[in-house]
Amino acid sequence: MFDLYVVTDESLSKGRSNVEIARMAYEGGADIVQLRMKNASYEDMLKDAKEIQKIADEMNRFFVVNDNVKVALDSGADGVHLGQSDMPLKEAVKILGDDAIIGISVTTVEEAIEAKENGATYVGVGSIFTTTTKLDAAQGLGLDMLYKISQAVDIPIVAIGGINQGNVQDVIRAGADSAAVVSAVVAQDDVRKAAHDLRDLILKARL
């Protein structure tokens, strides 16, 4: 479904906007971008979401919104990514429809199985490695848990948390279908090259 999944974060982007980061990530080869704007107003998030969705449509890529189902719906986004404490998955499916991409963060096999049963398009597993970009996430789940979850469900697995060029192939080989990154792309001087190089490593890991 996806190879490289990029999550925006303006606090790491060297002054570049979410929209600029998204465009460069897509140009570098990202298949999907998630707009993450913690503590932003509905209006601010909707503005960025509409602009990124337009770029995604132009480039035939995917776009999802973090947490906010209303912004996802009103911007025409392809879907939403939910945390365990956000809107219930079944409710999001009702609002956005069966064709929407609806992912949810999981940390255990049980959560992954429940997500599949409730209609998730994919599960985001992490944090695989220790990360400073999402301090509220469970830290360092490791490759063994990633493998166990990949064996337990037959929907795509997106690994996230501390993933970079040095370990991205490990997560693919451990069972992830896709790697989600924040700083490994967003914080780099050359966003396009960072995205391109990561995607290349993901594709090579599958050979």
Image (cartoon, grey):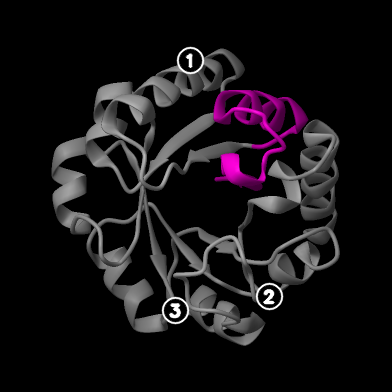
Residue corresponding to mark 2: 174
Location of residue 131 by image quarter: bottom right
Q: Residue 99 appears at what percent x and percent y?
A: 30, 36
The magenta segment is: 1-30
* Residue 179 or residue 47, whichever sits in front: 47
Going from the N terminus, do you reach mark 3 or mark 1 first?
1
Q: Secondary structure at mark 3?
A: helix
The quadrant of the picture occupied by the C terminus is bottom right
Looking at the image, how many numbered discs can be counted on the residues? Answer: 3
Residue 177 is labelled as none
Q: In whole angstroms, how far apart are the C-alphas of marks 3 and 1?
A: 36 Å
Residue corresponding to mark 1: 54
Q: Residue 148 appears at what percent x and percent y?
A: 53, 84
Q: Secondary structure at mark 2?
A: loop
* Residue 119 or residue 103, whichever sits in front: 103
Residue under the point 25% across and 29% down? 73
Left or right? Give the position of 188 relative to 16. right
Going from the N terminus, do you reach mark 3 or mark 2 first?
3
Amino acid tagged 3: Ala
Q: Are marks 1 and 2 in contact (CB under 8 Å)?
A: no
Is residue 22 located in the magenta-colored stretch of the structure? yes
The residue mark sitting in front, 3 or 1, is 1
Q: Secondary structure at mark 1?
A: helix
Q: Residue 11 appears at what percent x and percent y?
A: 60, 45
The relative height of residue 52 versus residue 123 in the rendered view (above or below) is above
The relative height of residue 43 versus residue 138 in the rendered view (above or below) is above
The residue mark sitting in front, 1 or 2, is 1
Residue corresponding to mark 3: 152
Residue under the point 14% across and 43% down? 94
**Neighbour tally class for label 3: few under 14, some 14-19, many 20 plus, Cα within 10 Å:** few
Amino acid tagged 2: Ala
Left or right? Give the position of 57 relative to 65. right
